Every structure is written in C-alpha cells, then in structure tokens.
Amino acid sequence: MRALPRWVDILLLPVLNVVLAFLVGGLIVLAVGQNPLQAVGIMLYGAFGYGSGFGYTLYYTTDFIFAGLAVSLAYHAGLFNIGPEGQAYIGGLGVILIGLALNGVSWMFVFPLMIICGAAFGAAWAFVPGYLQAKRGSHIVITTILFNFIAASLMSFLITRVLKPAGVNSDESAPLDALTRVPQLRSFIELFKNSPVNITFFLAIAALGFVYWLIWHTKFGYRVRALGHNPTAANYAGISNQKMIMIVMAMAGALAAMVAVNNVGGVQGRLILNFVNGAGFVGIAVAFMGRAHPVGVGLSALLFGVLYQGGQELAFQMPGITREMIVTLQALVILFTGAMGDMLRAPLARLFSAPAGGKQ
Amino acid sequence: MTSLNPSAQQRPSGAAASDLAIELVGINKHFGPVHANRDIHLQIKRGTVHGIVGENGAGKSTLMSILYGFYTAESGEIRVNGTPQAITDSRHALKLGIGMVHQHFMLVDNFTVLENVVLGAEDSSLLAPTLTKARAQLKRLATDYGLTVDPDAVIENLSVGQQQRVEILKALYRGAETLILDEPTGVLTPNEADQLFEVIRTLRDEGKTVILITHKLREIMAITDEVSVMRQGAMVKTLETKSTSPGELAELMVGRRVLLRVEKGPANPGKIMLDVENLVVTDDFKVERVKNVSFSVRAGEIVGIAGVAGNGQSELLESISGMRDQQSGVVRLNGVPLSLEGDDGASRARAAGLAHVPEDRLRMGLITNFSEWENSILGYEGKYGKGLGLDIAAAREAADAYIKKFDIRPPNKDLKTANFSGGNQQKIVLAREMERNPDVLIVGQPTRGVDIGAIEFIHNQIIKMRDAGKAILLVSVELDEIRSLSDRILVLFDGQIVGEADPATADETELGLLMTGSHPSGDKLPPHETPVQQTLVEMSPKNNTGRDTN
Amino acid sequence: MNLVDITLILDSTVRLAIPLILACLAGLFSERAGIVDIGLEGKLLASAFAAAAMSAVTGSAWAGLCAGIGAAFLFSAIHGLASINLKGNQTISGVALNFLAAGLTTFLGQSWFKRGGYTPQLSGDQRFSPITLPFANELKEVPVIGQIYWELISGHNIITYFAFLAVPITAWVLFRTRFGLRLRAVGENPKAIDTAGISVTALRYQALIITAVLVGIGGTYLSIAQSAGFNNNMSAGRGYIALAALIFAKWRPGPALLVCLMFGFLDAVQLRIQGVQFPIVGEVPVQFIQMLPYILTVILLAGFIGRAIAPKASGIPYTKER
C-alpha cells in the first residue's frame, strides 16, 4: 500500500477518526430525541463559559493528562497498560500517608513529598505486573485489569478498616490541614471561583513536557521505542527487555499516581473511597486519541476535560441526557481511534495516492 | 547438500496437449506496484516432475499460490487436464486434484496427525466417521508411497521431515493428482531430503505430477524431468532437464553471467582477537544446539563457518554476540572473557569491541518503523550524548556519513527503514557495525535477500575490514560465499565443528560431505557428479526474507 | 455449620456462578477461534440492560432473552468488524465495548425509563422464575438426599439448567464435531484453515455468534432471572472474572465449569461471612475474599501453579501474507 503523506497520517486521519466518533455519538443523542448541536453548545458553555466551569475543565484535564501519559508511556514500550485506575488509587495511599504524617506542615514542603511518595506507591503497584510480564511472561493486559480489581478491594479495606478515624461515619481518612493541602488556583486567581483546579495542573503540563523529552530526546526513550517496535532487535542492541518493561511500567504507575496528588492532596484533602472515579480509564481513550504523543495527549485530555465538565452542565440543562453520554463518547473515541484507527487509511490512500515515501 | 544422479530420469518430452496436467496461459498478478507475475505461460506434463527455479522474489511462489487458489490472478487462464478452470479458492483447487505443500507448513501444532489430515476435508459434521476412514486411508498411503507416520502423534512432537510428510499426506488424502512442493528441502536435513526425493520418485512412478519450486539447482538436476526458469516475475524458459546444465540455468536465473570471485590479497593473521572455548548453547526449547565448540579468530583474518542451515549457526552467533545465554564455555575478546549473561549481554559485547551483523536484519538488525538515522545508532545509542540526553544532531551527522560512504539509497536519513530495499537495509546495518571501529566483527548471512549488485559491495567491505586488521567471523549457508571470502573454513554440523579447511585447496565435495555429517573416509559416500561450475550454483539468497526484495 | 447452611451456600454458589459459566463459555468459543474478548464484561452488561428493558416493555421474559442476545450480537458484530475485518487491536476493541456498555446502558436507561438508569421492577412473566423439578415436593422431607434435591437441584430457573447443559454441549462441539475441529484450528493456526480452503473470517464470525448467544443469555440471567430488573453497572466485573476463569481453566469447558463454581462459591461465602468471627483469625475482611479470584488468577498467570497457554493465534488479526 502506498504511504500516506505525512500530514494526512499524523493530522487528518486522527482528526477524521475523532470526528467519526462524535458523529456516531451525535446520532445516538438524536436517536433518543435530543438535539446534539444544542448539547454541544451547552457543553461548550459549561466548560468555558464561566470561571468555575473553566476551572472544573482544567481540573478534569489534569487527571486525564496524567492517566493518558501513563497509558502512552507504556504504549511506546509495546505494553498496553489498562491499570492507571488502580495505580492512581494506590498512589492515593502514598499521598495521604505522607500528608497525614506531616499534617500541619506547609504545602510548599509537603507537595514535593506527596509527588514522590505517591509516585513511589503507584510505581510499586505497576511494577508488579511489569515484573510478572518481564520475568514470568504473564500478559500485561490481563494482569493490569486484575490489579485494578485487587487495588479496589485493598483500598476499600484500608480506607474502611485502617485509615478511617474513630467516630467518623463516612468511609474516608482523616482530613489534611488547610496548610498542608495542595492550594487551589482560586486562592491566586479570582476567576476560578469555587472550582477544584489546583497547582497540580502545572505539574501535569510539566509532565507532558517531561514525557516528550523522555521519549524523543533521551537514550532511555530511544530504548523504550526500540523495545516497543521490535523486542528482538532491542535484545540485539543490548537493551534489556526485562529491565525496560519493569522500569517503564513503574514510571507509568508513577505518572498515574499523580491523579492522586490532584485529588487526594488537592481537591479532597483526604482519601475517599473510589476517588479516581474512572479517570484512569479515560486515560486509555486520551492516549489513543492523542496517538501516545504528549501534544496529542494534552489536547485530547483537554477535550475530555471539556466533555466531562460540559457533561455536568448538560445534565442540569438537558435532563434527557445524562453524563453517561460522555462515557459512551469515550468508548466511541477508543473504538474509532484505537481499534478501528486504520479504517479510513485505505480510502485516504486512494485519495492521496501521492508517490511520496513509496517503496524504493 | 546431497548430490543425486540425474541419469535416473528418462521421460519423453514434447507430448500432446492432452498429456498436460496443468496449463497456465497469460497469468498476471500485481502486489501493489510490484508486478509479481507477468504474462506467464507454462505447461506441465502429467506424470512428470517439473521444476520451477528462480531467484528470491522471481514470482515462483506467487504463481503456484495462484494455481492453488490462494491468490487470484488478474488475468489469464488456468487449464487443468485441458479444461479451463476459474480456481477461486484452495478448496476448489483441491477438488481439481491440485495439492500444495507450503514452505512453512500449514499444520496445527497441537493437533494430531490425523486431525491435521482431515482438517477441511471432513465428510460430515461429526468427526468420528471421518477419523476412522482417514486412519485406514493413511495406512494405505503409507504402504503405497512409503509415507509412514504415526496418525496419533501430535505435530509439535514430530521432526520437521515428519511434519512435511504430514503435509504431503494431507494433499494425497484429498486426492491430489498434482502436487506442488514449495522449497521443500529448505528445512530438511540432508538425510531427510534424500527420503523426500525417494517419495517424489515414487509419486511420479505412480502417475502423479509433481511441481517442485526451488532455488537449488542441484535438486533440479537430480530429480526433475523438465525445468522452467523464472526471473523478475516473468517466465524465461522451459527446458528438458537432461539437456541443460546448472551453468545454463544459473545464467537464465540471474540474467547475466555472474562470477562470485572476490578480489583479495593474502591474509596477514595477527594475534588472537576472538577466542571461543568449549561453548555450549541451547535454543528456546532447551535443546542443545551448540555442543562444546572451540575456535579462535585472529586479527586480519576471516574465519568462515560453513554448514547446512539449522546446524547451530544461529545459536552460535547469538551466543557470541550476547543475545543468547550460554550454558557453559568462555568467549574471550582480546584475551578478556566477556560476561554475556542476561538479556542485555549484547551491550557488554559491543562495549568490549565486538560488532555484529545479524543473520536476519528485519527481525534483529533493524527497527523498520524507525527512520534511517535512528537505525544507524541502534546498539550504540549510549555513545550519543552525555548523561540522559540523546545527541540527535550527532546521530544524524553520523547517518549522513554512512549514507555517503556505503552509498545507501535513497540518501534520505528521515525515510522509514521499511521503505528501503533489502540491499540498502543491509548496508544500513553494515555501515552501523563496521564504522565504529570494532576489534571483532561477526557477520551472519551477509547477503541473504540482497540484490546482486549489493553483494559485491558488501563482500568488498568485509575484505576491507580484514585488511584493516580486524578479526572477522563469517557465518553463511552459502558455501560459495564462505569459500570466496574466508581465509579459513570451519565446518559446523549438528552443533559441532567437524572439520577445518583451507579455502584455496578445499575440495567442494569433501566440504559438502563434512557439512552433511558424512566423513569423507567413511563408507557411506553418496553418489555425486563432478562439480559443474559450482561457483554459479547455490548463489541465490535464501527465500525466508522474501518481503525485502525490490 | 449444618447441612442446611451448606446447601444454602452451595445453592447461592450455583446462582452466582451461572453468569460466570455462560460468559466463560462465551469467551471460550471466541478465544478458541483466536479472538481475545476483553469485552465480555460490556456484553454482559448490555445484554442485561436490553433484556430488562425489553421485558419491562413487552412483559415477556422470552422477549427479554431475545433482546439480551440481540444486544450481545450487536456488540459482537462491532468487535468482529474491528478485529476481523479491519484487523484492529482486539484488546482495544474489547475495552471500548466495555465503556460503550457502561455508558449506553445508563444513558439509554435514563432516557427511556427516567429512573436514574434503573429499569422498572419486573415480576411474574417478565422474569424467568424457578422451576420445581418432578418429585421435588414429594422428596422434600427425605433427609439429606431429598433436601439436597429440593434446595440445590430443583427450584432454579431455566437459564440455570441451560448453563449446566451448555458445558457438556460445548465440550462435545469442540472435540467431536467438524465445526469444533475447525474452530480450534483457526485459533491455533488460521493459515492452516485458509489453505484448506475454509474462510477464516466466516469461521471467526460463527464463533462470535455463539459467543453472543451465550453471553447474551448470561446477561439476561443477571437482570431478569437473578434480579428483578436492571441497575447501573450490574455486571460488576463478572465479565472479567469469567475471563480470569477461562484462563484458569486453560480454555477447556470442564475445568471452566469447576473454576466458575469455585469463584461463585467465593462470592457466596463472601456474602455470608460478613461480621462472622472465625477461630484464630477472627473476622476475615470481605475485601480479601473479593480479591481472591483475581489474586489466584495472577498467581496462575505468573506460572507458579502450572502454565496457562492461550490459543496461539489469539489476539492476532489474520492477514494473508504477501
């Protein structure tokens, strides 16, 4: 088959796939008798139209960037990490433990420690499937799924039986002191009103830049990509497949755990049951839509941020549409950009049958 | 490689049209921009063994896959027993009595022989009656054609030769009158190949028609009645085997007379650079493939390892280069033992000054999704940049230099490596490995799947390395390549070095016997003809990197 | 614990194992044919919703069953299109289907029934009700045997009996019929099937159809046999547990039944031991029992207790090589 022109391959094709996903989503909305265009309008207003809405959009975007990067980084090494949900959940344990230990100390000191500690917990949790894949040949997809469930049960046990202070009714840990909590942006920027976006957002932006640098501008990234494309050639080059798999999975887990810094350290200021709330899974859609490239991940995380926040608004304004429409859209995005990502390749190749880059 | 007496066949040629089992008229097939079969005409007489020869990528397998209904031709006609047939799928071909044994067997590994034989040819929706019938049928075929194999054995426990028998039995069970064999000896031991030829003769004597696809001219001379030569998708000529010669066939195959003579001066061996002592290596299934091998390579010499494919060469190369763990033994570089254990042993071998051109560039040597410049640092990426960062500018600069020096075409370092031809891909690997001034270079199958023009270039580069005082270990299944490049030849058979020879004086026959495990002084000397222009024979690349030809 | 307690636990073991058995067999057909089905969870959920919705509207459990199977069909068709025709990544497609089910069921449920994603409560003919087997009433008073017959064997709904019947049928189809031979072959080496002149695509779609029927019945069981209506995310990971059971059973029907019963048993025990003090260990946290199937599967996958080797071609789209 003729190669597609570069801009078609990296720009037009993914955009068309996303458009297709939204078209199908629109049809579903139409099918239940609602107006999809009106819905889009409401969502855009909800996401950007006022300060706290915009703040919420950025809050969601923060979560999705971390989860998307956790999937993307592993993907570059040829590993499909379905586990950010569990990795983020366990990361929450690290964040709350250090937070409670240093409760009352200024966030400026605790925030970096929350990052490190959360990352260590998330990394450890993701390391195990990595180890099992590298050393014992267990399939990473299956083990990371299983580890999501194990994480859910384990955390439910720890929160309800260990971390829950005596005399508290709801299932949650003791709260962090206001001084220790990661500060909300609203304390600096009036605009964000009562929205939960906090300085972890900047950490997410930095993570995007860091992963970009890591993948394309370091020896380590080169080795990750070599492993992802051709493990045998990586072995030939002297790159240890096993070590790389374990390191990459641990790093992915660390990235996923930053979701916990955002939520446990910042928004909630305590560890609550199921605080990840599907953000880890959204990361899968974000990674595929963004083609595992940090720029793409940033943009698709923003898009999903808009959808999630706009979806809230939608639920208020159009009772016929629930927030679950967003989950449906998320599924369609994974389907069209991931599983069926090459559907339009052949027709596009016919359209742009340019000789460029063909076989020599 | 065994030599067989061609005088065994005495079959008349020039028969009437009704004697034709298969007739192909004007067959055309494209794969994308590649014209794989162009206007092919071919007549195959019933009850004969018909050879089809051609270089890798000449279109032999495509043509036969069309006949077998695996692909459909764009134009042209297939006549079976004189009647035009539109063969739409393999099932249809089988119905018309055409069976095919593929190069890579189409067997289900965890099924029994019996299950494999009936698969797709079951009589009813329940299995039991078919299995009973097939069991009886297999017994009959075993006595008729000498094809004995245990019907209840599971395929993965059978030898390659036995698996091939199952493939032949599959075709015969389905009532094949014409049997297509695609490169059948490529995976066989010499002994198994002899047995296969016996079976082919019996099949012919029983009235079956056999089409043999191969690039080994010796087999053509030994077993066929007629031979057709293909080149670049076109049918060049059909000849009566007894009235042609390997020299003529080779010339028809490559289109011009090519002599594989490499200009090189005498070697000046220096001190021992690579020293292998009592090396034992197992394969992925824990089978010992290299058995206590010791040898050494000096600076400024090329040591060639000759042998039939599958006698431990791959494991030897992978072990010395650090890709595969060794069970026991020592590999010394410049007198210092290498620590190669672990799955990153290759990086330590490289750091010690050992470069490796792997035998399968697509599987190991290159990452085809990477651009050219990225591949030009594979394995050496640690040298580009200080600390964590990768010095991309330096890497790209190096790539430019290699492109120029090795005449890699197109000269575009940003092009995806998959889009280079086989020869140019090989040059990318060679440039990367040779240009980092290693002390020792180990090279596996340097010209496999490489076009003729590039072969000469690659050979000259290897000689240049030798003359620059490097120690070179060359492994190739092309005996001719070994003979023309090496300063010393070691023969590997069944994981052991069974002999050493001087390429200048070595007798082809003697080498051949060593390679097949028959010692020259032994009493089991198979018949062989006088070597006829042996330099021309066996020079076509092996077929298993089929995708990377132009 | 007396006999009554044990029969009660075993009885709920059976009830909880049924959707697992059906989903596991469904996955078996799919994976034996070379198609990885992470989407079992989504198919269960979608079928459960469709069955409950249809049953609520028509008043017929059988119409519900048809709708349940229909929903699984639709999902299988998407999975087939992505992974067979478009040769996409089967895992990604399965993950997408799981989200699609999670989103669509609640979204459509809310749009149609306006009960926050729940379907209306079902009763009578809208559900599959227990069947009393012959002589069960008469034997009820007979000690042990009669009790077991009454409690454990009799008094289940038709889907339960079907699920148990489906196991030997699956084994028979897989190992004694032409279709089974081809199905196993296409999951191991599709090229062998193609060169034998059989369509790989058709065979794999046939497998997906069977998968859809089985998992559709399983989903239907969840909403209109075991429960009296659909609620949000009611499959609750059972599709994944079934997948784990399939791996545990090494893709064989008989062991699949046993593993599903074992996982069902853990589930049943988990419900009963909450707050129960055991000697020595004291109270066993319910979460530990919940994670047990997953941990056991991880240990199995890691090769510490035998090896689970998947059908060789599973997960790999079939392309005719050039």
Image: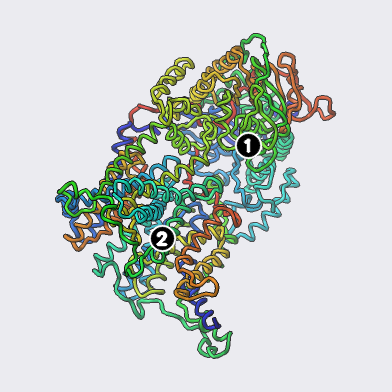
In the picture of the structure, the residue carrying the numbered disc 1 is: B325
For badge 1, the amino acid type reads Asp
Q: Residue furthest top?
A: B265
Between B464 and A268, the residue placed more toward the observer is: A268
Q: Residues within 10 Å of mark 1 (few under 14, many from 20)?
A: many
In the picture of the structure, the residue carrying the numbered disc 2 is: A155
Residue C71 place in picture, x, y as percent: 36, 62
Q: Residue at image x 36%, y 71%?
A: C64
Residues under labels 1 and 2: Cα distance?
Answer: 42 Å
Would you say residue B201 is visible in this rendering? Answer: yes
Q: Quadrant of the N terminus of chain B?
A: top right
Q: Quadrant of residue B335?
A: top right
Query: Does residue C140 appear to the left or right of B467 in the view shown?
Result: left
Residue C17 place in picture, x, y as percent: 48, 70
Here the colouring is rainbow
Residue B216 place in picture, x, y as percent: 65, 27
Q: Residue at image x 57%, y 24%?
A: B355
Q: Residue furthest front?
A: A105
For badge 2, the amino acid type reads Met
Q: Element under label 1?
A: loop
Query: Does residue B518 appear to the left or right of B62 in the view shown?
Result: right
Q: Quadrant of residue B145?
A: top right
Between A3 and A148, the residue placed more toward the observer is: A148
Query: Does residue C107 appear to the left or right of B336 in the view shown?
Result: left
Residue C171 place in picture, x, y as percent: 57, 63
Work out whether disc 1 and disc 2 sit on a shared chain.
no
Q: How many marks?
A: 2
Q: Residue at image x 60%, y 14%?
A: B463
Would you say residue B55 is visible in this rendering? Answer: no
Q: Residues within 10 Å of mark 2 (few under 14, many from 20)?
A: many
Q: Element under label 2?
A: helix
* Parent chain of label 1: B
